[in-house]
Amino acid sequence: MAAKTFNIPTLMQGLPPHTACQGCGHGIAGRIIYEVIEEMGMSSNCVAFHDLACGANMLFAQKGNGFSGAHGRAIPTATGFKRTRPDMLVFSYAGDGATYSIGMQHTIHTALRNENITAIVVNNTNFGMTGGQMSPATLIGQKTTSSPKGRTAELNGNPIDITEVYSGMKIAYLARGSVDSVANINKTKAYIRKAFEKQMAGCGFSFVEIMAPCPTNWGMTALGSIKRMQDEVLKLYPVGEYIDGGAK
Amino acid sequence: MVKITYNAARCKGCHYCVNACPKKCITLSGDTNNAGYETVKFNETECVACGSCYTVCPDYAIVIEKED
Ligand SMILES: Cc1ncc(C[n+]2csc(CCOP(=O)(O)OP(=O)(O)O)c2C)c(N)n1
Ligand code: SF4
Ligand code: SF4
Ligand code: SF4
């Protein structure tokens, strides 16, 4: 027996490779979620609710329970399930496009209800799957296929910062992690663990945003996209815990 | 003793592992896999089993085992 092993969680073993692009952040975000689930002993007692975007690659990269519903509706679908099975660990997994555009009403009202689920949002600052259009989280100046000259506040509005939107709301937990470095990946794992533990303790809504690269649509090499995260993206969207609430 | 299992067929050549290794024991192999990605190679004797390469790999191509 090895004294110490770094290997993917059992739920992810023995499957064909996922089809996300070279260097895509979803591969890391999806894996650390299942590492936490395994460490909590919840592998056979959890359900993932995926959005219909690049993150759905992660639905097929694991053998546990999972469901993919309509685009932008992962959070309400997870809500419905959790209300019927409060014993299970239930989380939604979606991108910034899904969560802050088409699904924004759920992002607000689920928090207002302090619904007892965990929402995980992988924020790569664009609509990845459909070809890199501007999302609400796109940075000022960022060139996308729908803002070819770069986003401007005058024409497109300012980028959404979920920590400002949820500021003062009575939810159980809000944190922002990142997959750009070993240190931040480990921090993000700890945030996911805390979010899941709060859910299982019935504390209410927990939300973890994970900043991630989309090298393909950023038009960068994989390592170049990590540099952009550190030089630009994480300066606007800093990693940390923002709300750490108590019991419901 | 450290055992590194590298699945070159799964590797997508992002080279995040090369960047993350504190002991600089991962380098470009100069080869490509069947999917056309440039793979990496490991110097097992320098490896301290920190797990950094595993942690940053988006494609689950690396397993690190440390024996007592
Ligand atoms: C109702 C509906 N509207 C639009 C689409 C097209 N669509 C698919 S994925 C997507 C957005 C993807 O961006 P994001 O949610 O940020 O996820 P990412 O792919 O970047 O991970 C859109 C608009 C759809 N599938 N269904
Ligand atoms: S388009 Fe972007 S988000 Fe989608 S799989 Fe490729 S790198 Fe990942
Ligand atoms: S486990 Fe650590 S020291 Fe060993 S190859 Fe990976 S990153 Fe380098
Ligand atoms: S991090 Fe993984 S996919 Fe990227 S080059 Fe290293 S082994 Fe290959």
Image: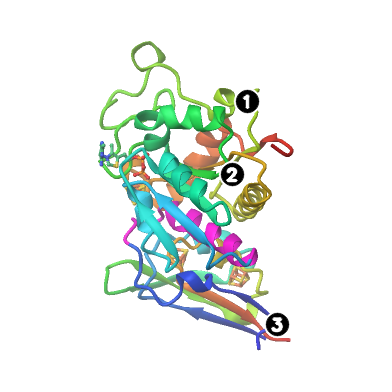
Q: Which amino acid is tagged 2?
A: Gly
For the view shown, which residue lies furthest in the bottom direction?
A1
Q: How many marks?
A: 3
Can you give x and y, in whole percent of width and height, for residue A45 in the image?
54, 63
Front-lying residue, B39 or A192: A192
Chain letter of mark 1 equals A
| Quadrant the N terminus of chain A occupies | bottom right
Label 2 to label 1: alpha-carbon separation: 20 Å
| Chain under numbered label 2 | A
The residue where tag 3 is placed is: A3
Give the labeled residue for mark 2: A177
Mark 1 crowd level (few <14, some 14–19, many ≥20, 10 Å Cα):
some
- Mark 2: few, some, or many residues within 10 Å (few <14, many ≥20)? many
Badge 2 and badge 3 both on one subunit: yes
Depth order, front residue of A153/B32: A153
Q: Nearer the viewer, residue A116 or A48?
A: A116
Q: Residue visible at 67% across and 42% down?
A: A203
Judge whether residue A93 is colored magenta. no
Q: Quadrant of residue B49?
A: bottom right
Residue on which disc 1 sits: A169
Q: CA distance from mark 2 to mark 3?
A: 29 Å
Quarter that holds the C terminus of chain A: top right
Amino acid bearing label 3:
Ala
Q: Amino acid at mark 1?
A: Met
Image quadrant assignment for residue A76: top left
User: Assess mark 1: CB under 8 A from ligand 1?
Assistant: no
Magenta segment range?
A19-40
SS for callout 3: loop
Numbered disc 3: what chain? A
Q: Earlier in the sequence, mark 3 or mark 1?
A: 3
